[in-house]
Amino acid sequence: MNFSKKSKKIGSKRQRLFFVVFCMLVVINPLPLGSNRTWAWSFEAMIASSLLILMVICSLFSTECISWHRLKKMRTELSLIGAWFVINLLYLIPLPLGLLGFLSPTVASAYEAANQSFGYLSLDVYATYQILMLGLYYFTLFILGVILINSRKRIKVVLALFLALGVFEAVYGMYLVSIGQTGTLVQINSVDIGHASGTFINKNHLVAFLSMCLIMGIALRMILTRNYPDMSHLDFKIRLVRFIGQPIRLLDFSLFLLLAGIWSTHSRAGLASMTLTLVFLFLFVLFSKKMNVSESIKLISYKKILVGFAFVIILLIAVADDVNYFMDSLGQNTENSADHVMQSAQGRLLAVEQAIEHFPKYWFSGVGPGAYQVFFVNHRSVEQLYYFDHAHNDYVEFIVEYGLFSLLLLSMLLVFLYRIFVFIFKTKSRFYNSLGICVISCMIYMLLHGNMDFNARIPANVVTIIVVISMIYGRIVMSGVNNTKKFGR
């Protein structure tokens, strides 16, 4: 009996150590250029892979250390992910030009023009190999998250980490703008000085990270909210002091800093996506099937509405100097605002037109993962003055690169969305209901912003959404949702 208790204690300590290393990965993830360099994400991938190997070895010697039972409930998801890796491997297999010409005539002609006796389904086999390795890193993190984030306490820790990282990125980005600089912890330069970029390369990538951090902060705020005692009988000054003195105000101030950081990016696509996502989040909470009419009325009580307006007013005052700049960026102070906006989006629209025009040549297998820039150069038109290594539209880029195989990626996305939606509507736990709504909101943000940018190609943002999903997914696959206690684990 004593041996059993000792074994459990040792196993618990090891698992806590594994969780700490996992949290370290979450912390360093956005810092080196948003991990948007091979040297950055490959270093993180080595740590993640080593951690997973250690966990497997540990579980071989002790059943108390790591439990893999959650993975057994993910057969559909793991099957789809496995099929996805098989497809990516197909692009790395050298094929005779005859067979390649049958599968993808246009790609085969490119290798034939280079006097090659064989070729690949991909126009850039090295970029495809890199995408495969990056995918393995994402998969490893997802497995680590599902296994290690296995309690409410750990969920709160991860939420707090994202909140802290978001505040750091927001403050650092605003600081660089205030001194007329923008850049990263690795390099600081004076490019695009009017837009906060934090440690990311581009404002559109920072705004996506900040937006997801804001949503995770809202999740933490919803989880930590408690029914405070009625203070209406107290003097106004006493109520004000008590209100300000509550620990939850620190979290509220952090959310305010995140909002200010999001605004300072001046990303039109990011701000629009964030606004729509917040509307969705509010409506989802308001009309959730687990809420009755009286609860809905409480949610929109006049006190909360007044507090919300107060924060908005403070935000507008804090960034008053930016309002005119932002309106200029939208073209409101120009003679023809529509032309201004269209000109700024012209390159992206041309990229979409290019994909529509030439996709029939690659409809079956695409041009290969990571090979969009080769496609762009090969079919670049005279009107396309700017060079694109990404389509500035995640959907266009995935379709161009994977062709018909992109339907498998859509299937994976739908499976994850469906299971999370079902869990939200069935769970009786306010904790997991709030968390699930915010996880779905993060996914919706990425889907919305993906229409105008390529955050699905930014490792830091992809890692963030993967960790966010893994926070709740282990609970989803293991829970008998009809038997979930209201405030139980």
Image: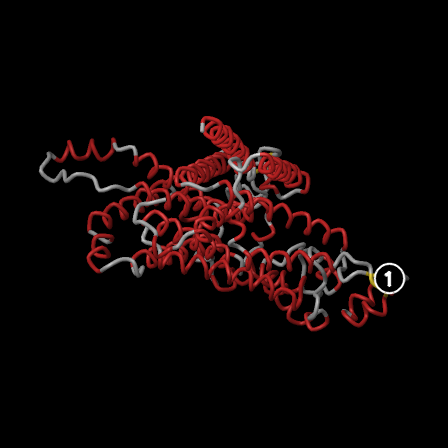
Report the amino acid beneath label 1.
Phe
Left or right: 379 as drawn, with respect to 264: right
Residue nearest the viewer, comparing 73 with 19: 73
User: The N terminus lies in which quarter of the figure?
Assistant: top left
Q: Is residue 180 in view from this perspective?
A: no
Q: Position of residue 53 (x, y in %)?
A: 63, 38
Assign a secondary structure to mark 1. strand
What is the crowding at mark 1: few (fewer than 14 residues within 10 Å), some, or many (at least 20)?
some
Q: Position of residue 412 (x, y in %)?
A: 55, 60
Residue at image position (35%, 59%) is 425
Q: How many marks?
A: 1
Q: Which quarter of the figure has residue 277?
A: bottom left
Q: Nearer the viewer, residue 97 or 420?
A: 420
Q: Is residue 99 left or right of residue 316?
A: right
Residue nearest the viewer, comparing 223 with 66: 66
Quarter occupied by residue 276 = bottom left
Q: Is residue 256 above or below residue 76?
A: above
Front residue of 113/264: it is: 113
* Quadrant into which the C terminus falls: top left
Left or right of 368, for residue 317: left
Task: Say above or below: 49 vs 105.
Answer: above
Q: Which residue is mark 1?
A: 118
Q: Is residue 331 visible?
A: yes
What residue appears at the point 40 percent right and 39 percent down from the top-left corner?
156
Considering every residue shown, the one lying at the far front of the view is 1
Q: Position of residue 217 (x, y in %)?
A: 39, 43
Q: Is residue 411 left or right of residue 111?
A: left
| Rendered image coloring scheme | secondary structure
